[in-house]
């Protein structure tokens, strides 16, 4: 692939370091991290570069996004950055049997709610007890004032697609709990975003 196929998301340069700081704390010492909705592929390349002890598996349902991911892979070959695969989060056929952790950056607010439900079903299928599920993006959180920027962002998303929008974290948590996950931590991030860490419940003896 040529260099022209690499796409850029300006927000990546602003949030990749804070995201990495959280991921260093929560990801396991080895194994494969499945990233859903990898988009341009810039996060995948950056995380694989700095988390060399892990295999990073990017994915995206959009063929043009997968082309961009592959172009970034070729720009800086890394043994631990795997070729992108096609995954529609809302589907139950992901073509992958297991993962040591899952990461999903900026998907939940720009996809139908069915994608969030599918994300949690997939995490239940793939992740072992105590494995982390990491989410990043804007949320409305009970007990906190709603940031005007997130209110406006949610309105603009719904104007583009009525099935999109900034979600209430309590709704996401309810779906996660139904699939065997507990909310472990919420970390404030730049530009009124949050890192949200769920973990698969340990098996009951």
Image (cartoon, rainbow, N blue to C red):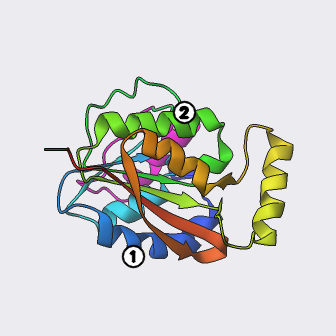
- Report the side of 46 relative to 25 (left or right): right
Within 10 Å of disc 1 (Cα), the crowding (few <14, some 14-19, many 20+) is few
- Give the farthest residue toward the front: 205
In x, y percent, where is residue 73?
38, 51
Vertical comparison of 62 with 8: above or below: above
Which residue is at 73% across, 49% downward?
165
Q: Secondary structure at mark 2?
A: helix
Residue 132: within the magenta?
Answer: no
Residue 66: within the magenta?
Answer: yes
- Report the side of 47 relative to 53 (left or right): right
In x, y percent, where is residue 127?
28, 43
Kindly identify which residue carries mark 2. Answer: 63
Indicate which disc, 2 or 1, sits on the residue closer to the N terminus: 1
**Looking at the image, can residue 158 be seen?**
yes
Q: Which mark is residue 107?
A: none
Kindly identify which residue carries mark 1. Answer: 21
Within 10 Å of disc 2 (Cα), the crowding (few <14, some 14-19, many 20+) is few
Q: CA separation, marks 2 and 1?
A: 30 Å
Magenta region? 60-86
**Looking at the image, can residue 50 be seen?**
no
- Give the farthest residue toward the top: 93
């Amino acid at each position: 692939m040529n260099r022209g196929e690499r796409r850029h998301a300006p927000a990546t340069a602003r949030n990749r370091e804070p995201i990495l700081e959280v991921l260093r704390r929560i990801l396991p010492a080895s194994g494969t991290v499945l990233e859903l909705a990898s988009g341009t592929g810039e996060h995948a390349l950056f995380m694989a570069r700095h988390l060399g002890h892990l295999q990073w598996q990017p994915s995206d349902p959009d063929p043009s996004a997968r082309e961009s991911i592959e172009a970034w892979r070729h720009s800086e070959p890394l043994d631990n950055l795997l070729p992108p695969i096609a995954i529609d989060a809302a589907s139950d056929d992901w073509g992958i049997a297991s993962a040591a952790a899952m990461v999903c950056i900026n998907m939940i607010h720009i996809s139908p709610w069915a994608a969030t439900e599918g994300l949690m079903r997939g995490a239940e299928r793939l992740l072992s007890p105590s494995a982390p599920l990491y989410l990043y993006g804007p949320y409305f959180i009970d007990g906190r004032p709603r940031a005007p920027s997130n209110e406006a962002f949610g309105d603009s998303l719904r104007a583009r697609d009525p099935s999109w929008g900034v979600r209430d974290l309590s709704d996401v948590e309810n779906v996660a709990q139904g699939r065997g996950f507990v909310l472990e931590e919420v970390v404030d991030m730049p530009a009124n975003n949050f890192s949200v860490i769920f973990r698969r419940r340990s098996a009951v003896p």
